[in-house]
């Protein structure tokens, strides 16, 4: 796939956490550009600011300085409600823990981001949800509640949920951190497939060196600064 | 349109025990409100109903209205002779020129029946037993159009009074106190001392202690004689109106027309109605506290729910739900608890009203109103009031938890999970 348009452009991202004497700067002017269709791993030791960066890139948090543009929309310049709408339209999230709504079935959890815009109830939406569950390999579990699914299955539901709004950018925070190696590998394959087949742009925060090694590009974060940007796509191709 | 209700409902369903407790507390609060409204309204309605049944819609009294001047009253074409008289101390207080007054009253379009009566305090004597009574001389055929006492006869008959010139109809408690029954002969001693032989022809049980303890109805001429009045004099004229609700307006008209004070049943019972109102307000205020306690229960459940659902709230926010949406979800939960809780309250209230109404009670002879059961009123308004109050109170109880849910920062929660 030809990589041309930037999906994500972050410039000079700075973020302080904590208050008063305990406040400290976690990110010191981070610049990142991710092109459409890239499969990027963000790696770094604990406390390097990976999750903080991910939340800023995903519009879940406001930077103290700098800007984040996703598909041309500046997330740092909009109010809270507009930001929520942009998150809903542009970004998909997968977390280390599956974070499903326990009272709703797998299919309903997948459709949940569509509820936020008043959808998720039409026949088309349900068909899309089922298709996504099929893509992650658990279509037959669509009616099950999260507690009736295994950890791996729950994470697959979470992946399907992150895709339902056809996001420009899929952000994942240690998506396999809570899974055994077999399930972790399956989730990796799933991401790889989404990237390859759908051209889905993916940024994954991971500790998993194997996962990082298999991505197109590795961004290394240390003490709140990007210290490495390694493109591996050509090698893989 | 975002389906806040759907998420709210699912979250409540996911916490069946806490939800059930919240519903029960709202239900009990709203049932208490319904039952209290039923009880207090039932008591005052019963009192008023019995009072209006045993008294006229309006009564013309043997008193002149304040500032009354006879000059103002000539009817068209009538020659009026204005006599200036000083008050004669031993003159009987009475409505004079009764036939003229009756004619004037009967000419009013709102007056259905106007019937004279002579009321006098008397002592009834039966053997050695003496009881004071409110002796009233009436025209039996007309009186039955003015009050419903004829339907409250428990022994003897109303018609017998017309047939028996010296007949008397007694209140049930007077009869019991004297130890008399239908057919008994007794004496009535008037204010001036003269004794009058009477024969009991009927006994009335109105349910109102004031009436049953003092009533002694005789024929008008007898009472006129006992009170020392002429046949063209009476102490009151009782009115039955086409529309009893209009009684106060008609009373003013009657005063204008006759020059005598006229009191509507509303004016006569104003003090009782006011007392009932005050008492009902106090009771209701106390019961509203029950609803407030239920509101605390709802608030508690929702605060707990917000705390338990922090992670879900973060997920919903991350997926694009706005702060407003999150607030609305929890507000909907409050409203939902109010709606379902008041449905529980409706059922519980309806059952309790029936149970309480079926319980036998006896407040004794000194009670204002005598009944074998509590008189429970049941109006749709009680249910709607309980419904409205429960829903509003529960929605208010949800405001703080909803604000809290709306203010949660998703990153703080997501970070905390790591």
Image: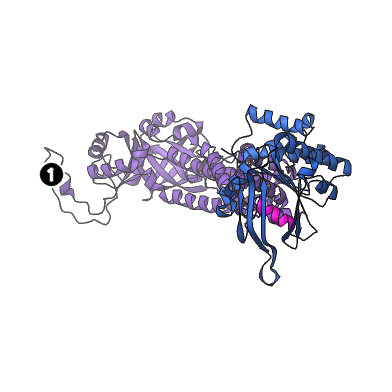
Chain colours: A blue, B purple
State the extent of the magenta-drawn residues as a range. Answer: A46-64
Dividing the image into 4 quarters, which one contains the C terminus of chain B? Answer: bottom right
Residue B10 visible here: yes
From the image, tell me which residue sits under label 1. Answer: B80
Q: Is residue B326 magenta?
A: no
The image shows residue B26 at horizontal and vertical percentages of 64, 46
Farthest bottom residue in view:
A21
The stretch drawn in magenta includes residue A48: yes
Q: Which quadrant of the figure contains the N terminus of chain B?
A: top right
Residue density around tag 1, few if under 14, some if 14–19, many if 20 or more, within 10 Å: few
- Image vertical order of residue A129 relative to residue B334, above or below: above
Q: Position of residue A146 (x, y in %)?
A: 78, 39
The residue nearer to you, when weighing B275 against A126, is A126
Q: Compared to B91, does B1 lie above or below?
A: above
Foreground of the two, A65 or B188 = A65
Q: Determine whether, in the image, residue B108 is placed left or right of residue B267.
A: left
Residue at the image point whose x is 81% and y is 44% from the top: A214
Left or right, A56 with respect to B208, comes to: right
The answer to which of B223 and B406 lies nearer the viewer is B406
From what the image shows, is residue B212 above or below residue A229?
A: above
């Amino acid at each position: 796939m030809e990589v041309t348009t930037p999906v994500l452009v972050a410039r000079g991202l700075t973020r302080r956490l904590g208050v008063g004497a305990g406040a400290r700067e976690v990110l010191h002017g981070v610049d990142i550009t991710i092109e459409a269709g890239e499969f990027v791993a963000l790696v770094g030791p604990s406390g390097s600011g990976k999750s903080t960066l991910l939340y800023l890139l995903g519009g879940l948090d406001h930077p103290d300085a700098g800007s984040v543009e996703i598909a041309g929309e500046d997330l740092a310049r909009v109010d809270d409600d507009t930001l929520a709408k942009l998150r809903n339209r542009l970004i998909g999230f997968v977390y280390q823990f599956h974070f499903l709504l326990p009272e709703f079935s797998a299919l309903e959890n997948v459709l949940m981001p569509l509820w936020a815009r008043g959808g998720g109830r039409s026949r088309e939406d349900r068909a899309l949800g089922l298709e996504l569950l099929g893509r992650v390999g658990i279509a037959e579990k669509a009616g099950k509640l999260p507690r009736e699914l295994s950890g791996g299955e729950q994470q697959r539901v979470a992946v399907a949920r992150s895709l339902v709004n056809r996001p420009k950018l899929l952000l994942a925070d240690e998506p396999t951190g809570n899974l055994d190696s077999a399930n972790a590998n399956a989730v990796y394959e799933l991401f790889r497939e989404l990237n390859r087949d759908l051209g889905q742009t993916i940024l994954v925060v991971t500790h998993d060196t194997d996962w990082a090694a298999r991505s197109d590009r590795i961004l290394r974060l240390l003490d709140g600064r990007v210290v490495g940007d390694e493109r591996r796509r050509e090698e893989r191709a | 349109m975002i389906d806040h209700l759907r998420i709210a409902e699912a979250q409540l369903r996911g916490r069946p025990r806490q939800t059930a407790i919240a519903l029960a507390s709202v239900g009990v609060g709203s049932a208490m409100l319904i039952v209290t409204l039923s009880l207090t309204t039932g008591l005052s309605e019963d009192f008023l109903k019995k009072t209006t049944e045993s008294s006229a819609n309006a009564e013309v009294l043997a008193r002149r209205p304040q500032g009354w001047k006879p000059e103002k009253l000539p009817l068209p074409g009538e020659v009026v002779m204005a006599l200036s008289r000083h008050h004669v101390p031993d003159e009987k207080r009475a409505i004079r020129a009764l036939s003229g007054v009756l004619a004037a009253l009967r000419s009013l379009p709102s007056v259905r029946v106007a019937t004279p009566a002579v009321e006098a305090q008397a002592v009834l004597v039966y053997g050695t037993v003496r009881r004071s009574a409110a002796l009233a001389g009436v025209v039996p055929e007309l009186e039955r159009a003015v009050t419903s006492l004829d339907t409250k006869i428990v022994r003897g008959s109303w018609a017998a009074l017309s047939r028996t010139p010296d007949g008397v109809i007694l209140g049930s408690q007077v009869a019991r106190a004297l130890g008399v029954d239908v057919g008994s002969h007794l004496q009535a001693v008037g204010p001036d001392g003269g004794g009058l032989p009477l024969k009991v022809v009927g006994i009335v049980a109105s349910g109102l202690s004031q009436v049953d303890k003092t009533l002694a109805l005789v024929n008008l001429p007898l009472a006129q004689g006992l009170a020392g009045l002429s046949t063209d004099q009476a102490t009151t004229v009782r009115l039955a109106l086409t529309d009893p609700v209009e009684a106060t307006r008609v009373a003013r008209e009657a005063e204008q027309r006759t020059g005598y004070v006229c009191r509507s049943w509303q004016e006569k019972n104003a003090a009782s109605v006011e007392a009932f109102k005050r008492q009902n307000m106090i009771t209701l205020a106390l019961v509203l506290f029950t609803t407030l306690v239920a509101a605390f229960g709802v608030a508690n459940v929702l605060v707990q729910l917000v705390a338990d659902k922090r992670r879900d709230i973060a997920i919903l926010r991350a997926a694009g739900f706005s702060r407003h949406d999150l607030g609305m979800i929890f507000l909907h939960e409050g409203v939902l608890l109010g709606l379902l809780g008041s449905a529980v309250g409706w059922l519980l209230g309806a059952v309790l009203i029936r149970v309480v109404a079926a319980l036998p009670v006896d407040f004794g002879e000194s009670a204002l109103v005598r009944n074998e059961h509590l008189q429970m009123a049941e109006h749709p308004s009680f249910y709607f009031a309980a419904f409205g109050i429960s829903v509003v109170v529960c929605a208010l109880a949800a405001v703080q938890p909803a604000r809290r849910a709306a203010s949660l920062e998703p990153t703080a929660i997501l970070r905390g999970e790591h």
